[in-house]
Amino acid sequence: MEGLDVPNEPKGLYVRRVPISSHYSDHVARAYPRSASHKRRATTLGGLASTALVLSLLTAAGAQPATADDNKPGGKQAEPKPPAQMSTVGGEQLGRPGTQVNPKKGAPELPTKLTGRSWIVTDAESGKVLAAHNAHWRLPPASTLKMLFADTVLPKLPKDRTHKVVPSDLEGMGEGSSLVGVKEGETYSVHDLWLGVFLRSGNDAVHVLAAMNGGKEKTVREMNERARTLHANDTKVVSPDGYDHKGQVSSAYDLTLFARSGLQNKDFREYAATATAKFPGETKKDKKTGKTKRESFQIQNTNRLLTGDGGVEPYPGIAGVKNGFTTNAGNTFTGVAQRGDRVLLVTVMHPGAKEAHSVYKEAAKLLDWGFAADGKVEPVGELAAPGNAAAGGGAPAGKGGEAGGSGTHAAAHTSKPSGGAGTALGITAGVLVALALVAYGVHRRWPLPELARRRRR
């Protein structure tokens, strides 16, 4: 299940709050639109509530929800360990387990008591990895996978295009999914739906956009192709919304690649940095006038470093990107922040559960360290540029690590506002081969949204 807060519940929605863990002070908040298909699921949802209550009691007693990777015989659980050798995309050092940092004289020490199973700090513009911890560990990503969904689908759908939701659009969502409140029979613009994805992490909005993109299967296939193009070889997509599915994994390195690629797109940047917005509600008929009127309600971004909600202060210079939570993934977060002329990306996956909102607090500590370490550390690796099979310093370890990607798909992304493309001709074994190359259009001065500029120190 994926959990997030609903600070402003719209009228006409069923809302259920179930504490998932005494360690995570976020609560599962679920909005179930009053439609025929949702009423049909009432019995199932009742069972889910009972299951969630049991999980709440267990976790309150100090137990963690079990996953397939950390169960020991006899029912005991142990903290999983990273593989001894992981992918070396981005550099050999990134394939090693544990913390990787190359400090120069006078470099600040890394923050203490970091509990994330995996994390990475990178310079967003140069792509240099400043420090990392199990950067290529393949873990469940939760809703941070929506960054790949947006990077894949957002450039393909005009923001003013509209769609009337039919029941089949919302089929296949996992029980307990985070919802923005999309209703069957109502019409939404692509712009509205992306606000639902970025601000509320709405799986309902994801599924409608996937339907507009040709369906879930097509979208999942394109997301996997896009991941290969970006050299995100740790990633396997099963569902576009990040909901827990067997075999669906990513890594801190890959999630950072998705954020960096998505941020090349102006609309992606603006959605990721939006703190609050209005979302269309139900169309109702006025009993007195007989006229119909579409209501709307306010939604708030669940990224606490952006909104400062729940006792977490807004981070100076923050401009997105995406947070998530599922039972298997724990809390995950990727953020981008600017201080002066420097832009950093940080990703934290599955921190320990002893402190409330630890994923945000640890991300903020790593950002502070990254800004303080400017020019005082040697990079431990780099973010691979998309489309170039020679990039990244090595091939991934293990199965499923195909290098390179779809040239056609890579070329399709060159229409992004800050992307670019070129064609190179090479001769291999006497044969003229046309290679589609993507010039990674990272500007030395990213035009981050005004929100980030207002929050600089």
Image: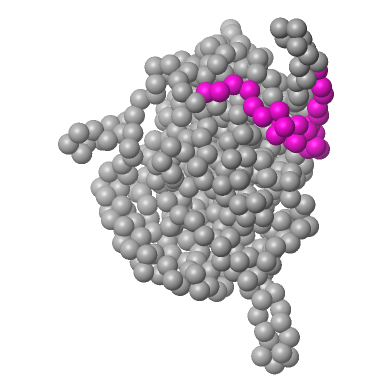
Residue furthest left in the image: 74
Residue 228 to residue 280: above or below: above
Is 29 positioned to the left or the right of 127 in the image? left
Answer with left or right where residue 149 lies relative to residue 251.
right
Task: Pick the residue in front: 43 or 311.
Answer: 43
Q: Which segment did they paint magenta?
A: 401-424
**Position of residue 162 in the picture relative to residue 392 (left or right):** right
Look at the image and say whether residue 412 sits in the magenta stretch. Answer: yes
Question: Where 326 sits versus 346, above or below?
Answer: below
450 or 225, which is in the foreground? 225
Q: Position of residue 173 (x, y in %)?
A: 49, 56
Image point (59%, 69%), residue name = 184
Picture quadrant of residue 450: top right
Residue shown at the point (40%, 70%) measured from the top left: 42
Res. 287 in view: yes
| Residue placed furthest toward the bottom | 288
Q: Out of 31 and 219, give the one closest to the viewer.
A: 219
| Residue 44 located within the stretch drawn in magenta | no
User: Residue placed at 43% from the left, 37% from the top?
Assistant: 247
Q: In the rendered image, is residue 314 in sight?
A: no
* Residue occupying the far front of the picture: 430
- Numbered label tally: 0
Residue found at x 36% / y 60%: 48
Spot occupied by residue 226 in the image (x, y as percentages of width and height):
64, 34
Which quadrant of the rendered structure holds the C terminus? top right
Image coordinates for residue 406, horizontal then vertical, percent: 67, 29
